[in-house]
Each structure stands twice: as C-alpha cells, then as structure tokens.
Image: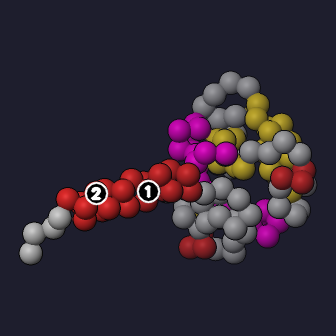
Amino acid sequence: MKKSGTTHRLMAMAATLAAALCLLAGCGDASVGDHSTAVGGSCDYHSDCDDFCLTDWPGGMCTILCDDDSACPRDSACIDKEHGVCLMECSADRDCPGGYECDDEDRRGHPGKRDVCVED
C-alpha cells in the first residue's frame, strides 16, 4: 500500500516535534539533580548510579569521574575532589540536596573555581 503525501507530511511533522521535545528535555544528555543517577542523586552502591557513587558523602551522591568539564553533563562541573568528580552547579545552598552546601571549589582540568554542591 502506497502512503499518501499527507501521511508523509504528518510523519515528518511528528518526527520534527519529537526531536524538538528531545532537545528541550535534554535527551542524550545525562541529567543533573536530586533524583539523577548521573550527577546529584542519592545512592548506596556504585550500581545505583550511571558511573560512580560517593558512598562516604551524606546519603551517597551519584557522580561521574572526570579529568575536566568535558566529561560532565550540563549544569555540573569537574571538581578537584576525590581525584576528579562531576558535581552539581549551584548559586545558593537551597539548590543542593539536604546535607550539602553550595561552595566555591577548585576545578579539575581548568583554572579557577566553580560553585557546586559539596558535603557540609
């Protein structure tokens, strides 16, 4: 059965809409936040996270091991702690999970500091 021009246009519009929604939602880019398995979520074991669990931090924190920011998802930075880990960026303590504070920390692989959520 041959598809009509209308069907092709509808399929193209649906694909375009799906791609736009994916870009807005950050598809393909690891998420960052309190419930993320990439960076910022709580964990008990490394298997709870996409990459690594900081098990000795309060409640554990999912992170990604890094040498510079290129390994970190958007809204996180590679910080010179634990031999290089991606941590959630913040502007105030309220941006961080309980047991954490927003603090200026040395970057890894880049000069300067970045405000990120670290253990209190």
Residue 106 position within the rendered picture, expressed as x and y whole percent measured from the top left: 75, 34
Tell whether position 7 is magenta. no
Residue type for callout 2: Arg
The residue that disc 1 covers is: 17
Extreme top residue here?
A: 111
Density class for disc 2 (Cα within 10 Å; few <14, some 14-19, many ≥20) is few
What residue do we see at 88% from left, 62% from top?
99
Q: What x and y, as percent, mark residue 105?
A: 79, 37
Q: Does the magenta stretch include residue 63?
A: yes
- Of circles 2 and 1, the one toward us is 2
Of the 4 image quadrants, the one containing the C terminus is: bottom right
- Secondary structure mostly seen in magenta is loop
- Above/below status of 5 relative to 66: below
Question: Image point 70% across, 49% down: which residue?
Answer: 87
Tell me if I can see residue 62 in this picture: yes
| Magenta segment boundaries in residue numbering | 55-76
Label 1's element? Answer: helix
- Evaluate whether residue 54 shows in this view: no
Percent coordinates x, y for residue 41 in the rendering: 70, 65
Residue plotted at (89% across, 45% down): 92
Disc nearer the start of the sequence (2/1): 2
User: Which residue in the structure is indicated by mark 2?
Assistant: 9
Quadrant hosting residue 108: top right
**Label 1, residues with CA under 10 Å away: few <14, some 14-19, many ≥20:** few
For the point 65% across and 64% down, which residue is it? 36
Q: Is mark 2 on a helix, strand or loop?
A: helix
Quadrant showing the N terminus: bottom left
* Residue type, mark 1 in image: Leu
Quarter-of-image position of residue 109: top right
